[in-house]
Image (tube, grey):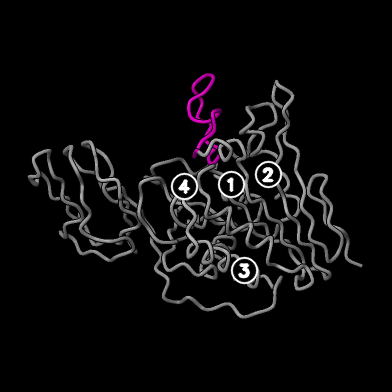
Amino acid sequence: MKKPLQIGTVVAACGERVKGKLFVGEFSTGTEVYLPVVILNGAQDGPVIWVNACVHGNELNGTLAAQKLARELDPRDIRGAVVITPISNPLAYREKKRLSFLEGNYGMGENCNMGEVFPGRMDGCMTEKLAFVLLGEIKKVAAAVVDFHCWGYGQESKPYTVIKKYPDEKISREIFAIAKAFGSKMICTLDLTRKLDEPSPVDRQMDVLCAEAGIPSFMAETGHSERAEPEDIDFAAQGAIKVIKYYGVLDGEVPANDDAIELKSRYVIRCKHDGLAIAQVGPHEFVKKGTVLSLVYNAYGDVVEEVRAPFDLYTVSLPYMPNVNGGERVAFVGIAE
């Protein structure tokens, strides 16, 4: 007979949906910190798929997609289990911010962005404890992880996935396969076998640590931060279901998604002048070299700069907040090598 599944002190018997709290730590005030967790334990044996959301506290479409899965999946249909952690950074979530009061530059000036502190540590700040407990439980049981995110504040985009390429070709192929199964039409691949020019470090992100433990994982960018967008929420939830089906945890066919575009390099395009930068193209468009990406207007409404594509590229995201300083991002782009 299939065994119960335990995450921390939360236990789900066969065929059960159980909601509980995963204890993380305690503040000096005596206030305890928990991670909400939902276990959907099927009646039959099979892999455990983990769906995570809200590493950054204002990325709410992912939380809502994860909660939708928790409500709508039926354990009786599951072969194996699905574990859902819909709010993995409860401190930042409570503050309605990307980062909590502990994150950013704190203490000795260390960077404590939860997205970049994995594997975490139990003798660190509460953010590091959250990362340590979450990753520790994932590594005990998960066969694969879907990690929901949203693109940064002020950016306009469409749902896409971010994967990593590792020296281990087997796990790299598996990660690409599940990202493709998810259904996004754009897959951004960060090649960790070579030097990267990324706006933030990647070596301490959760999916990297999962892969090092042999667990395929990827990030799914699921809409705007600080918004609840039904279309993107539904897309994210359905994407996770496709990954769950890919592993046979649910019955059903997974569409091929053969027209997905893989971007193998990403770049930030910046302006040189202060002003209002008005995008001339949309997100997820193919743009030829020399095409105007953005026009920068000065205080009098004069065009002071035409920001052009330096090479053939695809747009990933564009700012909808037009007020820029010289040197700021006016486009995040990629190329399909």
Residue under numbered circle 4: 226
Q: Which amino acid does label 2 sit on?
A: Leu
**Cα distance, mark 3 to mark 4?**
24 Å
Q: What residue type is labelled 4?
A: Glu
Instruction: From the image, tell me which residue sits under label 1.
Output: 206
Residue placed under numbered mark 3 in the picture: 241
As rendered, which of 160 and 217 lies closer to the eye? 160
Give yes or no for contact between labels 1 and 3 (Cβ–Cβ under 8 Å).
no
Q: Give the range drawn in magenta.
A: 97-116
Query: On the image, which quarter does residue 91 sit in?
Result: top right
Q: Nearer the viewer, mark 2 or mark 1?
A: 2
Identified at 51% across, 36% down, the residue is 99
In the image as oriented, which residue stretches furthest toward the bottom? 253
- What quarter of the picture does the N terminus occupy? bottom right
Q: Is disc 2 in contact with disc 1, using a CB cutoff of under 8 Å?
A: yes
* Residue depicted at 45% across the width and 54% down the height: 191
Question: Which image quarter: residue 62?
Answer: bottom right
Earlier residue among tags 3 and 4: 4
Q: Where is residue 33 in the image (x, y as percent from the top left)?
A: 70, 34
Residue at image x 69%, y 78%? Answer: 251
Rounded to the nearest whole Å, what is the CA distance between mark 4 and mark 1?
22 Å
| Image spot of residue 248 (x, y percent) | 70, 73
Determine the CA span between mark 2 and mark 1: 9 Å
Task: Say which amino acid is labelled 1.
Answer: Met
Which is in the foreground here, disc 4 or disc 1?
A: 4
What secondary structure is found at the residue carrying circle 4? loop
Q: How crowded is mark 3: few (under 14 residues within 10 Å), some or many (20 or more)?
A: some
The residue carrying mark 2 is 134
Mark drawn on residue 26? none
